[in-house]
Amino acid sequence: MVARQIIQKPPGMHWRYRGTLLTLCTLAFFVTMVGRLVISPVVPLIIDDFDISNTVIGIALTGMWMSYSASQFPSGVLADRFGERVIILVAIGGTGIVSLVIAVAPIFPLFIIGTTALGIVAGLHYTVATALLTRTYDEMGIAIGVHNIGAPAAGLLIPPVGAWIGARYGWRSAILLVAAVAVPTFVLFACQVRPTKPRRPNQPMRGRFTLESIVELLTRPQIAFPTIISVLATFVWQGTASFLPTFLVAYRGQSLELAGTVFASYFIVQAVMQVGVGWVSDLYGRDRAIAGCMILGTTGYVLLIAVPGWVSLSAAILLVGTGMGFGAALSPRFLDVLSEEEQGTGFGLVRSVYGLFGALGSVLVGLMADLFGWASAIALLAVLLLIVFCALLLNQLLSLGY
């Protein structure tokens, strides 16, 4: 295991610029999440337009999330070669351009190609921005928590707006929201963020992808264990992000617009609580914060499927939204045991691995819904979170040190 080094912040890193950097990285993350989340509230419309099943649209969403995860590892390598600023700009601009392709797709195979390409370009952002912020801030749990607000902020604004536009003007018009936020964000980031110096500008990229180095990192006990629990937790996050609005329409009988509003509320909770999860992880430990998220999320999913009414729905959204903020504790858990040199490429590798497997949440939740109904599909998510909690508890009780 390589201990995380104490990093001396670059001289002249004024606190105001650090705030600007954090704000714009968060806004860039917001754009990449808008591109992926705007699809969810209009899934019922896409299903009707292309005459497909939940499983088939789940395949398209899984392809998007898998390609998003697959690009995490090379994004770190590319940032080491060309600098973080360039890669983040490619992520922002690429997300806007590919969304236009999706919006005009005349046939479903082209829609799948578009969503897969969207995942690739959007996936370039997170690992690169996280590594950059980790080198900039000492309180990385809080910084990552703030940065991660970009995802729930997208969920706050886009589902109700996208559902409203989709219901009145069609799902294709809703997808065009992505370009509307990508263009000004690209300009702001290009103008306000200083060029970043590549850390390995002369090292051949091919040499960074050796099988031996990949296996060595992934088999470290303190990397392998959180990677496994990340697969399960990410599976749940993906299934929720892909199908919560559809579940609310099909199982709880809500209108498309109302389901989009509830979906937005879920992201509001995640946005607010995510910073708190990061703070708890800094103060009381990563695993305690993650375990708490798992219990809260499990309880919320049970309420969603077992208890009718607005009170139970409100409580469920509060619990699930908080539980799905686990990333603010889980990401620092990896970074704690990676050296500064490994934080870009190494963190990208583990995100690619757990994200690829976790992306199956979209297609498998859709398949479960088609075969056994929505109650069984959501119950699966609750069970997976409970498994993660038990794994963390055993690691603590048996002092396994993973």
Image (cartoon, rainbow, N blue to C red):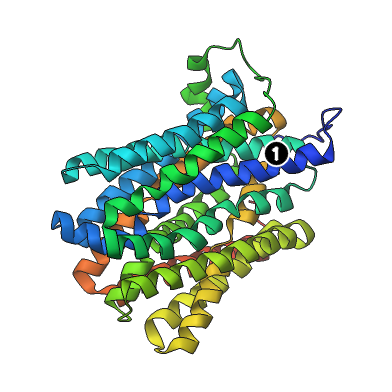
Residue annotated with mark 1: 21
- The quadrant holding residue 174 is bottom left
Crowdedness near tag 1: few (<14), some (14–19) or many (≥20) residues, C-alpha within 10 Å: many
Number of numbered markers: 1
**Relative to 58, is 389 on the left or the right?**
right
**Relative to 11, is 250 on the left or the right?**
left
In this view of the protein, which residue sits in the foreground, 52 or 375? 52
In this view of the protein, which residue sits in the foreground, 324 or 310? 310
Q: Position of residue 342 (x, y in %)?
A: 64, 30
Question: Given the current orientation, which residue lies at the most extreme front position?
Answer: 169
Instruction: Identify whether 318 is placed above or below 219.
Output: below
**Which quadrant is home to the N terminus?**
top right
Q: Which residue shows up at 24% across the image and 74% down it?
A: 373
Amino acid marked by disc 1:
Leu
In this view of the protein, which residue sits in the foreground, 180 or 279? 180
Q: Position of residue 229 (x, y in %)?
A: 52, 55
Q: Position of residue 109 (x, y in %)?
A: 18, 41
Instruction: Identify whether 130 is placed above or below 229.
Output: above
